[in-house]
């Protein structure tokens, strides 16, 4: 590796580090800053990358794989199936209110059926990372609203276990009868994997576990990348393969894997979000800004309505219901992952442009809306005076 490549890569990583520190100072997620860095370092940006572009591209692929692999580690197959069974009404309400705007917007933007399905996913998924930060920063932990927000995030994450294989197959086979047939087979495959995992996942964990952290790290990382590669060979997304193998693992190996892989995930996911920005020419954002703003307005209303309607029979106080509604607004890492999957699979780069603008808006507005509405509700509470 020559000096220019080392200098450029070191400068990029330090720039991302500075942005992460800046985000931490303002108590907001670093994702929008990584996106802006990508816009600055991409074609048409202020300082286009030269020799390290290919390295960042490979790093972004590893970042997406690790993001979904570690998401899968959060849930055992048994918990996943149980949660999906118990939360069908909330899941259907969330799907109808939040997938539909993006899906129909895709047709208005002349995206076609498959790309519109991707955009529907972009508008559906709340950012679990941002939601968790809102709950922590505003002191909602332990409340009914926080529990509801976390439940919805879990439902959406689990929905992705079925949704992403469908997209991964359709993007290869297209919106044809054969493509939908392959997608149906992919869903059946996911269900079979989950059923098998309910029986064998603890045993697999015992086989993989090692008291040597070095050996365990190499084993888990190698397995995730290997399964991702096999998934690509059979025309299913590598990220989906990583998600499924993450779900299959549980027990001591999964617990240790989360600790060992977290720093790697943070590093390579920063590359992933930056690379999405690299794919987008800043000049392509103004033409889609109107559509992104309109989608953002609809997205705020649809998530707020989801929270309000889903909690109406829960016995929550009005302030808790407002928290449940505003805590769902932000979109983030998963929306970008869906768009990134689509663009890297050959779909229009305009999908990334709309998604980047949309996420930048909502990842900023979501926490502000939650904070302001919570303060307003607090100020409306009656003051109890001591006698």
Image: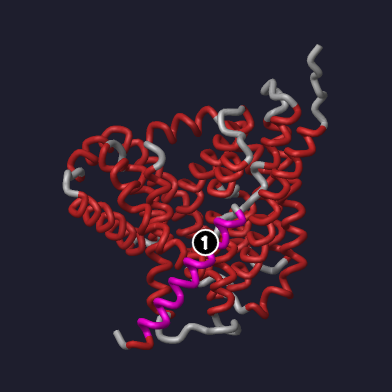
64 vs 341, nearest the viewer? 64
Q: Residue at x 54, y 80 (%)?
A: 42
Q: Seen in the image, is 375 located left or right of residue 238?
A: right
Q: Residue at x 64, y 55 (%)?
A: 363
- The colour scheme is secondary structure
Question: Eyeballing the image, is 383 above or below 335?
Answer: above
In reply to whether residue 11 is colored magenta, the answer given is yes
Q: Which residue is mark 1?
A: 21
152 vs 177, nearest the viewer? 152
Q: Residue at x 76, y 28 (%)?
A: 318
Q: Which residues are magenta?
A: 5-26
Q: Position of residue 143 (x, y in %)?
A: 60, 28
Q: Position of residue 320 (x, y in %)?
A: 69, 30
Q: Seen in the image, is 218 located left or right of residue 329?
A: left
Question: Eyeballing the image, is 118 above or below 5?
Answer: above
382 vs 150, nearest the viewer? 382
Q: Residues within 10 Å of mark 1 (few under 14, many from 20)?
A: few
């Amino acid at each position: 590796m020559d000096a220019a490549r080392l200098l450029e890569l070191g400068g990029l990583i330090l720039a991302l580090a500075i942005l992460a520190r800046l985000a931490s100072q303002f108590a907001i997620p670093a994702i929008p800053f990584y996106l802006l860095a990508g816009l600055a370092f991409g074609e048409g940006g202020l300082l286009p990358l030269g020799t390290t572009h290919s390295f960042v591209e490979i790093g972004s692929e590893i970042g997406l794989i690790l993001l979904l692999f570690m998401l899968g580690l959060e849930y055992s197959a048994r918990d996943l199936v149980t949660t999906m069974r118990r939360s069908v009404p909330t899941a259907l309400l969330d799907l109808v209110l939040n997938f539909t705007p993006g899906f129909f917007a895709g047709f208005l933007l002349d995206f076609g059926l498959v790309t519109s399905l991707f955009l529907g996913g972009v508008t559906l998924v709340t950012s679990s990372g941002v939601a968790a930060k809102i709950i922590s920063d505003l002191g909602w932990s332990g409340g009914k609203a926080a529990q509801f927000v976390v439940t919805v995030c879990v439902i959406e994450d689990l929905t992705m276990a079925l949704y992403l294989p469908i997209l991964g197959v359709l993007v290869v086979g297209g919106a044809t009868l054969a493509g939908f047939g392959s997608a149906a087979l992919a869903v059946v495959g996911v269900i079979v994997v989950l059923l098998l995992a309910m029986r064998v996942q603890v045993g697999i964990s015992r086989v993989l576990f090692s008291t040597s952290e070095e050996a365990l790290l190499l084993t888990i990382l190698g397995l995730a990348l290997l399964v991702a590669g096999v998934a690509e060979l059979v025309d299913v997304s590598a990220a989906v393969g990583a998600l499924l193998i993450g779900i299959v693992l549980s027990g001591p190996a999964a617990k240790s894997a989360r600790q060992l892989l977290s720093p790697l995930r943070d590093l390579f996911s920063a590359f992933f979000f930056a690379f999405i920005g690299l794919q987008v020419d800043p000049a392509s954002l103004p033409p889609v800004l109107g559509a992104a703003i309109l989608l953002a307005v609809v997205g705020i209303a649809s998530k707020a309505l989801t929270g309000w309607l889903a909690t109406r029979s829960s016995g929550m106080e009005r302030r808790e219901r407002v928290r449940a509604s505003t805590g769902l607004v932000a979109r983030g890492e998963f929306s970008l992952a869906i768009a990134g999957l689509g663009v890297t699979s050959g779909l229009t780069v305009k999908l990334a442009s709309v998604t980047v603008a949309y996420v930048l808006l909502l990842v900023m507005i979501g926490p502000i809306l939650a904070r302001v509405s919570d303060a307003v509700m607090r100020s409306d509470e009656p003051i109890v005076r001591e006698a």
